[in-house]
Image (cartoon, helix red, strand yellow):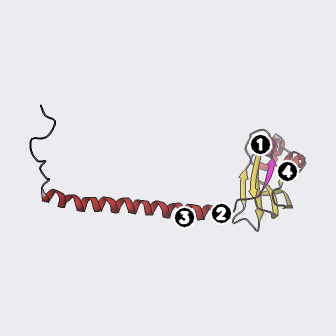
Amino acid sequence: MSTEPAGPIPAPPQHALQQESPRRTLVLLFIFATAIIFIVLLAVLFFRWAGAQEPSSVVVVQATPAFDGAEIIVEGVALRAPYRVTVDSWPESSIPFYVDRGSYTLRIVRDEQTLYSGDFVIRHNQVLRIDLAKLERLLPAPATASTRARQRR
């Protein structure tokens, strides 16, 4: 028993080699196109990330259950649109507003009535805490049953 072949190894037919060449070129073209698309998308992500400006400061509003249903609005020149948050019934909830340095106005509105409006200036990398418990005196007194009956008449 010999491990050597009995004769010469037959060559593949010419038509098989001619069919593999276009397929191979097409596969290489797709691999190259995928690599180019990946590099372009990576560059777009990098330039979007490098050009983005994250807010540098934060205003934290400490709400109390007494302000349940009130809307807290932060307005400023640097904001595209005012930040609006409705206070829910969570006890002692903290509401963060991420802003850049500058001048802003904080308004507290309930039932289309402004309860508080105040201006503040915030610096770069500053955390400003506003405790609404100190403003509970501004809330209207709760309506009693007799007051509600008079309002209906």
Q: What amino acid type is highlighted by mark number 3? A: Val
Q: Name the residue under label 2.
A: 52
Q: Name the residue under label 1.
A: 93
Q: What amino acid type is highlighted by mark number 2? A: Ala
> Could you say which quadrant of the image residue 66 lies in?
top right
Q: Does the magenta stretch include residue 61?
A: yes
Residue most extreme to the top: 1
Q: Which mark is residue 44?
A: 3
User: Please, is residue 93 above or below residue 77 in the view?
Assistant: above
Write down the region rendered in magenta: 53-64
How many C-alpha atoms fall within 10 Å of the one at disc 3: few (<14), some, or many (≥20)?
few
Q: Tag 4 or tag 3, which sits nearer the N-term?
A: 3
User: Please, is residue 102 above or below residue 149 in the view?
Assistant: below
> Could you say which quadrant of the image residue 123 lies in?
bottom right
The x, y position of residue 108, in whole percent, is: 80, 55
One can see residue 111 in this view: no
Q: Mark 4 points at which residue?
A: 130
The x, y position of residue 14, in whole percent, is: 13, 59
Between 57 and 106, the one lying in front of the other is: 57
Callout 3 touching callout 4 (CB < 8 Å): no
